[in-house]
Image (cartoon, rainbow, N blue to C red):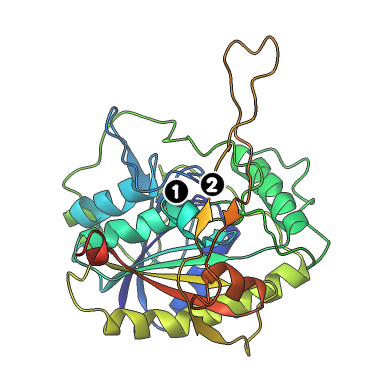
Amino acid sequence: MKLLLTNDDGIASAFLHVLIRALRDAGHELFVVAPKNEQSWIGAAKSRHRPVRSERAGRDFGCPAWTVDGTPADCVNIALAHLLPAAPDAVVSGINIGYNASLGFILASGTIGGAWEGAAHGLPGIALSQHLAPDVFEQLRRAQKHAATGDTSTTGNTGTTGNTGNTGTGSDTAGNTTAGNTTAGNTVNGSNTIATGNTTAAAAATASDTTTDAPTVAAAPPLTDEVSATLAATARHAAALIPELARATPPRAFIVHNLNFPYPCHDHSELRRTVPARVLVTRLFAPQPPGADGAHHFLYRPGEDITPPGSPPTDRAAVEAGFISHTVLDYTQIGRL
């Protein structure tokens, strides 16, 4: 199966790299187009007010790969119009660092935004997110930030502690996990020329995606044994589920499959069909301190779950109970009478 991969944690994310290896080992034909920098909490935003630049990734992923100095939605839109030689069978976004669950957060998720951009092109969209314990998430976030900026002084601090605490701190949204993504508003930092008309170059791309003039992709921070085992199991589940979900999704269905994986995840972890939890999200910015000159800073809050008793199983509850959550986001149902 031919798959376009993106994410919102950026091209240097180890979670993306593990997914690439699992899908490549499963025999899929892959194209990777991921943000140059982290784009968490950006939703389906596109970079309207400046040119967006794409360039070949300076790392050999074993498949053609590009970076885009824009959002996940920018990545998918530019990839489908200008980089890939032909349309893929599905667009896969993730694996996100932190889960993406509940109505209050799903629309803010850059991971789901990338998958939705595929659905908006008439393709199956599949979003993958990994729940993490709060301390593990925070250590991974800091390590990835240092790796992305080239500061290796603390890259060893990738988390050595465990699997307690399921209220999450994630990186993307979805009601879940994001203790401190102050970079959410990064609709990018970058540059000035949009890549166009690169279909010919993409068609000539070889299995190696390194080029002599491509910028170097920072090495992903190392993972602890526990995180590595969970991530490997999640990637194996994803490699089995992605082709099944892509084949089951009709063309132009405007459907995103939102998959959230528990922490820890095992080969025997069971899949549950779920609905988004109903979560109210308020006060995501800290009060303005004295002398701050009007500045407000992002402050993650898990929100208030107001899911009525007796409702179908929710994404958040399923993941926190150790199940793999599969929610079908059918955008044709919005506003239906």
In the image, is 192 to the left or to the right of 237?
left
Nearest the eye: 167 or 160: 167
In percent of the image, x 66 and y 77: which residue is there?
321
Q: Is residue 162 above or below residue 37?
A: below
Neighbours of disc 2 within 10 Å: few (<14), some (14-19), many (20+): some
Q: Which residue is mark 2?
A: 281
Q: Give the residue number, with chain letter if any, for mark 1.
A: 108
Q: Residue furthest right?
A: 161
Quarter of the image for residue 222 reads: bottom right
Evaluate whether residue 18 shows in this view.
no
Placement of the C terminus among the 4 image quadrants: bottom left
Q: Label 2 sits on what residue type?
A: Val
Please tell me how crowded label 1 is: few (under 14), some (14-19), or many (20+) other residues with Cα within 10 Å: many
Q: Position of residue 89 (x, y in %)?
A: 26, 74
Task: Give me the residue at 19% from left, 53% from top.
Answer: 81
> Residue 336: horizontal and vertical position, in percent?
21, 64
Q: Give the quarter of the figure containing the N terminus.
A: bottom left
- Mark before the other along the chain sequence, 1 or 2: 1
Between circles 1 and 2, the one closer to the viewer is 2
Is label 1 in contact with label 2 (beta carbons under 8 Å)?
no
Residue 233 sits in which quadrant?
bottom right
Q: CA distance from mark 1 to mark 2?
A: 11 Å
Marker disc for residue 164: none
Q: In this rendered view, identify the residue nearer to me: 142 or 252.
A: 252
